[in-house]
Every structure is written in C-alpha cells, then in structure tokens.
Amino acid sequence: MSLIDQLWMPVRHRHHGRIWISPTQLSDPDVLAFDADRGDFNGALAQFSIGLLQTTTPVNSPIAWRKWLDAPPDAATLAQWFQPVREYFRFDGEGARFMQDYNLRADTGDGNDIAALLIETPGESTLKNNGDLFVKRNHVQGLCPHCAALALFCLQVNAPSGGAGHRTGLRGGGPLTTLLVMGQDSPCLWHDLWLNVRERDKFLEETGANPNKRDAHFIFPWLAGIDRIQSQNGQTTPVQVHPFHVFWAMPRRIRLEMENLESGDCDLCGRSSSGLIRHFFARPHGLNYKGAWQHPLSPCYENKGEWLPVHPQPGGIGYRYWLPWVLGMSTKSREIRPAHTVAFSNAVRQGVPLRLWAYGFDMDNMKARCWYEATLPLYELSNCNKDACARLQEQIGYWLAGADLAVFFLRSAVKGAWFNEARGDFSMVDASFWSHTEASFYTQLKDLIGKLRTNEEIDVMAVEIRAKWREKLSSACIDLFDRHFVGSGQIERQNPRRVAQAYRQLKNNLHGEKIHRALGLELPENNKKSASKRKARASVTTQGNLELE
C-alpha cells in the first residue's frame, strides 16, 4: 500500500468528528485538525504533511504561495503534486518500504516487540529492575498498519539515544519543533500546514544541503542501502544529500515484520484490523547525522561557533521562550534564533494572523521525561515592520532579563528559608513563578505590539511598562514566598530567624540595583541612598578585616 492513497491520517472533521483521510485530502475545507490519540503522533503528522508538501510543491513565488493560502488546491491538484513520489511511500511488500531499512531482513536483524517503536516504552534495563511504575509494560502488543506507519515515522523524527550504535535523529534526540498556525479562528487544517511551506527555490537556497543530489535515495533514504549515502562507520553531512532529506531523515535501521499477520483490534486507535503488526527487526549503525544541519522547523542556539537545534527542557513551554523562538535573542551568555519558517514569516508574510505551535519530548538520553506542547500567541506581530520588531525584541529582552533575575531571587530565598545548605530539585519554584506571571506578560505584550503596529512613539511608555513589570515580578515573588512555599508551612517545623532573613533579603533584592539595571530602569533616589549606605558599610567591614589580618 502507498501512504499517498491510504486513509491513514486521523483528523477532526467539521461535520463527522474523527475520520481518517489520505494526504490528497489535506486541503479539504472541512478538515480542521489532526486528531490522533497521542500528542507526538499529531506533531509527527504535521511534520509528515509539511515535508510532503515542501518536497512536491511546484510553487515558486510569493504570489503563487498566497493564492494557495487563500484558495486551497483541490484533491486532484494535490494528487498531481504527489504522483511523482507516490511509489516511494509504499509501506509493505518486498524491496523499498517507507522509513524502513532497504537491506534488513528477519535473518539479519534483532527481533523487537512493536511497542518499542513508542518512545516512552520502558527499555530492557527498566523492565529488569521492575521500574515501569508510570508507563507499564505490555500496554501495546499489536498495531494496525496505519498506526505502525505513524509510530515508525514519529520514532525516526524524534529518535532519542537507543544504546550503542542506535543513532539519534538529524536534530538530536527529541528535538523541539515550532510551527506557525493560524490565529484563534483557524479556517481549516490546510492553512496551518501551508504556512510552514516555503517557495521551492527559497527553500533550496537556504539549506546547507546539496540540491545537485537529485537521485531519489538522497531525498528518501529508504529507497537504497545506507552505503549509497555514507560509508561503513562513516557520517552523513548536509552536502551528501538533497535539501529535502531533512524531512525524511532515517537514523534507525528498522523493518517491520509483516508476514503471518493476525486480525484483531489495534492497541492505539482501537480499530479492527485484518493484519496487526506485533514485531519489527532492527540493527544498529544507521545514518549517522553530523555537521551543520539546518532544519526549517526548529529554533537553534549557538555553541562554540556551531548552530545546534533547541530541545525541550524540564519546566514546560511558557512565555520565557516567546522571544527566542519568535524573534530570536542574543545575550552575553546565549544566542538563539528562530526556526527558518518562523523567521521568514516575520519578514515577508504580513497580514496573516498567526500563533506559534511548539512541541517536543523532554528526553534524558533514552528516557522520555515528558511530552511538552503549547501554543504561544503572536497577536498581530505579522503587521509590524522590521523596525518595530527590533524595538519589540529590545523591550522583551528587558522583561525576560528582569524575570530571570526575579526567579533566581525567589529560588534563593526559598532555599534560605528552608535549609542552611539546600540541595535538590527546586524546579517547582521556577514553574510556579513563570505560571504566576504569564498572564501579565501576555497582557503587556499584546498592548505593546498594538502600539508598535500603529507606529506610535513608545519610548516613555516602554519605561513605564518595565517599571510596572518590576512591580508585578516583585508582587509575584512575595506572594509565592509567603503564601505558597514558606508562609504556608507548619510554623513548628520552621526556623523563624532564617525565614525572616530570607524574606528581608528577597525584598531587598526585588527593589535593588541589579533588577533595576536588568530592566533598564534607574534606581529610585531613596534606593540609591540605601545602596550607598550598604556599600559604605561593606567597605568599612572590608577595611576592618584587612586591618585585623
């Protein structure tokens, strides 16, 4: 079967609830969103669809791109686009199979239960130590071909560390993906997908890969043995493959066992199938992705002269990532730039109401700690010119610098109130702070974007916003310290002196010179006098200590 023709993609239909469609139906105006039973499957479906559209679209100008946004192509047009690659997406049979190793067979691979395709499935060590407390063993024993195809693609896209020789994905294990989607009233799924597709020549120009590598296996690596791309124990760099390869990277050598299948109900979608897949074969040493890969759907950070894909971190996805993932951010300690599709949209696609859909696994090597997914508002950012975006970038940089300092002060105060020497995980303090201040951030962000969009003078207003933001940060920290973490504890179990000292230090920090400087604010006169006195006392103490020595 070819996945181009099969009804294998679960979606939410405007009139019929959940149905399954083929890729040629992605432009149906009544198809609203992907509707798989798992968040990572919905993310994989989006990446599959964007990759397929980007690989096959003949669109090569902004005018043509906008035409298809305003009036989506019909199923016949999509079928025409996909026809040249239709045979490359066969999922069963002999020879080449979608996302499966070309040469691997049952007698050359190690057998695995089908559940091992799912990233959160406990591994051998976890099972041996009886450590599968939250994700139990044997919860998936058979998958229908449609869910198996989706699980396989999801694993290849996110591929975490899998032991010796089992490669991570092109963006490393569990990358962050950021997609542009339509505003609150998204007309249909097509618009959310098409926003992330570039004009063909623009896409080919801005990758580090080699557009002259036109043979099909340089795009779809399952069409030939891996030795056609990389030598034994070698590496795969961008210049060895075609730019479209980034959507179809295949780090794992896997082949599904599709003989002697039995009928039954799929353990994921629940549908009855005449051919449940229960096992697959695997071998180590697949494509070993190295070098300056630039994936269009992931933001990157600079590390020792290299740009590396961002990965989700503990604590979830919140407003602290708005600036680096939307406009980019540069500080003394880090530099982050948004995904290519996001940066391109900021520059040229004005008048389209947008949001940012961000998602990915938080991985600890082979262990999936959490799946994070969130949608960040962009308000009317697409209507701001380049100068307005630069001013917005500067102002939000101040806001986030102040917030980073405030959460550090809060965490230090909580530690000081609880323990003399505190070690351990205090991430709940950070998470509570970011959640507590999120609404205020987005309220002032929306207001500022509105002012910049209409070219209003914002210099005085920007200073006032930063001053109010400092007050909100201060209020949030005091409230969390007093009502949630320290003040709410049992008094007989606390050390009042230590609590009082921590509280006093927290208030001093929140009104002190460091946070004012981080926010680009002048220190009030009374604070200046207090700071001068503290410096004088510190100087006297230092001199006294020197004299004693």
Image (tube, helix red, strand yellow):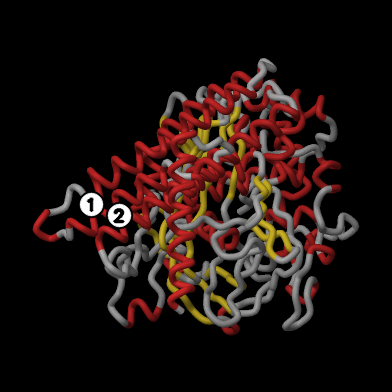
Cβ–Cβ under 8 Å for marks 1 and 2: yes
Q: Would residue 158 be found to the left or right of residue 408 on screen?
A: right
Which residue corresponds to the image point at 81% horizontal and 25% vertical from the top-left? 63
Q: Amino acid at mark 1?
A: Val
Seen from the viewer's position, the closer of residues 441 and 220 is 441
Q: Position of residue 34 (x, y in %)?
A: 50, 39
Q: How many labels, in total? A: 2
Q: Which residue is mark 1?
A: 486
Q: Amino acid at mark 2?
A: Ala
Q: Would residue 511 be found to the left or right of residue 201 on screen?
A: left
Q: Would residue 471 be found to the left or right of residue 158 on screen?
A: left
User: For numbered disc 1, what is the local secondary structure?
Assistant: loop
Residue 364 higher or lower than 536, as above or below = below
Please identify the quadrant where the N terminus is shown.
bottom right
Which mark, by number, is residue 514? Answer: none
Q: Which residue is mark 2?
A: 502
Which residue corresponds to the image point at 62% horizontal and 66% vertical from the top-left? 100
Which residue corresponds to the image point at 50% horizontal and 58% vertical from the top-left? 151
Residue 240 higher or lower than 248, as above or below = below
Q: Position of residue 137 (x, y in %)?
A: 32, 69
Seen from the viewer's position, the closer of residues 472 and 389 is 472
The Cα atoms of the two marked residues, 1 and 2, are separated by 10 Å
Visible in this render: residue 7? no
Q: Position of residue 487 (x, y in %)?
A: 20, 48
Residue 110 higher or lower than 418, as above or below = below
In front: label 1 or label 2 = 2
Sequence-first disc among 1 and 2: 1
